[in-house]
Image (cartoon, rainbow, N blue to C red):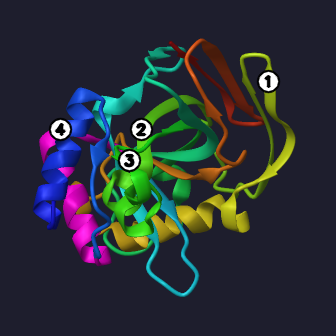
Amino acid sequence: MTDPQTLAAALIEAHRTGTRVEAPVLPLSRDQALSVQAAVMAALGPVAGFKVARVAGGAPILAPIPACHRINDGGTRTVRDRVGVELEVGFELIAPLPAGDLPTDLAAFFRPCVVLELVDTRLSGPAADDPAMKLADLQVNAGLVVGGGLSDWDGSDFGTVTGALRVGDQVVLDGPATVPGGSALANLALLVANVGDHCGGLQPGQVVITGSLCGLPWFGPGHAVAGQIAGLGQVALTLA
């Protein structure tokens, strides 16, 4: 495996079979990593949303979230060995965006919501920890659960929120938590300004997630997951 096309084919097979890929660390440029994302999504099907993260002094991390990995609120996800669970603020796009940057009338275009992101790699060995390989691997997204949201949002930001996350008997979060970078709207604007037509661009019905409120804890099967963000609502999942 020596080129992005071969890596994309191996990642597609890993998604379909639930296995991990033995791959060397390729010296991928950002554009090459995004091209691998696009090839993988062309095979997996529709996009459920995008994740985004700021990079100091550089272009942001962004990655599509496959709709085939979206789980209904209160649903069940089968876990092979372990999966990361993140509680996040999300924004569902409810109307087509005009061209350009984030519109000023935010409530006409977005519905804030509480989400769980699941995290897992399709890679094994050193490749699983390489930043460019992780970016190619959809920034290790492995699932999305969208919970409650605001239908009468006033457009205000989410910086420090009051959140709770319980996985089985473990309390992961219970109290104040800060969105990465301190502003969910800044992260949303970053995605809107940079996604362009990547993997079809941001479309109505898709959700932008803005970063973990609880770090990245890992769990195996046999756990009930219950999350909440004050003012947004609740979200739940079972790891089977």
| Residues packed near mark 3 inside 10 Å, few (<14), some (14 to 19) or many (20 plus) | some
Instruction: Choose mark 3 or mark 1, whichever is in front.
Output: 3
* Disc 4 target residue: 13
Let me know if residue 103 appears in the view.
no
User: Marks 2/4: CA distance?
Assistant: 14 Å
The residue under the point 65% across, 21% down is: 225
Dividing the picture into quarters, in which one does residue 202 lie? bottom left
User: Marks 3/4: CA distance?
Assistant: 14 Å
Vertical order, 188 against 148 (above or below): below
Marks 3,1: beta carbons within 8 A = no
* Disc 2 target residue: 142
Residue 117 placement (x, y as % from top left): 53, 39
Dot 2 falls on a residue whose secondary structure is: strand
| Residues packed near mark 4 inside 10 Å, few (<14), some (14 to 19) or many (20 plus) | some
Specify the label residue 124 is tagged with: 3
Vertical order, 106 against 15 (above or below): below
